[in-house]
Image (cartoon, helix red, strand yellow):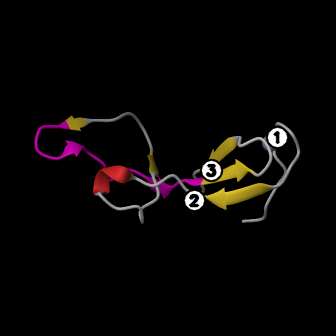
């Protein structure tokens, strides 16, 4: 993805991601799932059949502003 300027201060944005710590690992980026959470007694929040996108988070190198994108 091409870098773009910070919407707050115009400095360079760095690409990264916010890890999903619930999996006990720092290797998995957080996910965006469509719709509202549907609770399941056995499996927690159901995700079957829903769109599931990896979230890329950009951080401003000057002011620290975070901007997230869930691109398909
Ligand atoms: Zn900034």
Q: Nearer the viewer, mark 1 or mark 2?
A: 1
Magenta range: 40-56
Element type at marker 2? loop
The quarter of the picture where the C terminus appears is bottom right
| Residue that badge 2 annotates | 72
Q: Nearer the viewer, residue 33 or 7?
A: 7
Residue 9 appears in which quarter of the rendering? top right
Dot 1: within a 10 Å radius of its alpha carbon, few (fewer than 14), some, or many (20 or more) residues?
few
CA separation in Å, label 1 and label 3: 14 Å
CA separation in Å, label 2 and label 3: 9 Å
Element type at marker 1? loop
Q: CB of mark 1 within 8 Å of CB of mark 3? A: no
Q: Is residue 47 left or right of residue 30?
A: left
Where is residue 55 drawn, in percent x and y?
A: 54, 53
Where is residue 49 drawn, in percent x and y?
A: 33, 53
The residue sitting at the right extreme is 10
**Which residue is depicted at the point 45% across and 52% down?**
30
Q: Nearer the viewer, mark 2 or mark 3?
A: 3
Q: Is residue 48 visible?
A: no
| Residue that badge 1 annotates | 7
Q: Is residue 17 left or right of residue 2?
A: left
User: Does 58 lie within the magenta span?
Assistant: no
Element type at marker 3? strand
User: Does 46 lie within the magenta span?
Assistant: yes
Relative to 57, say whether 27 is above or below. Answer: below
Where is residue 29 drawn, in percent x and y?
A: 47, 58
Q: Nearer the viewer, residue 50 or 4?
A: 4
CA separation in Å, label 1 and label 2: 22 Å
Q: Is mark 1 within 8 Å of ligand 1?
A: yes
């Amino acid at each position: 993805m091409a870098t773009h300027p910070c919407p707050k201060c115009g400095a360079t944005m760095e690409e990264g991601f916010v890890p999903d710590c619930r999996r006990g690992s720092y290797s998995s980026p957080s996910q965006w799932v469509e719709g509202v959470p549907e609770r399941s007694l056995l499996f927690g929040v159901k995700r079957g059949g829903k769109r599931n996108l990896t979230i890329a988070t950009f951080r401003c190198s000057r002011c620290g502003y975070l901007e997230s994108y869930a691109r398909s």
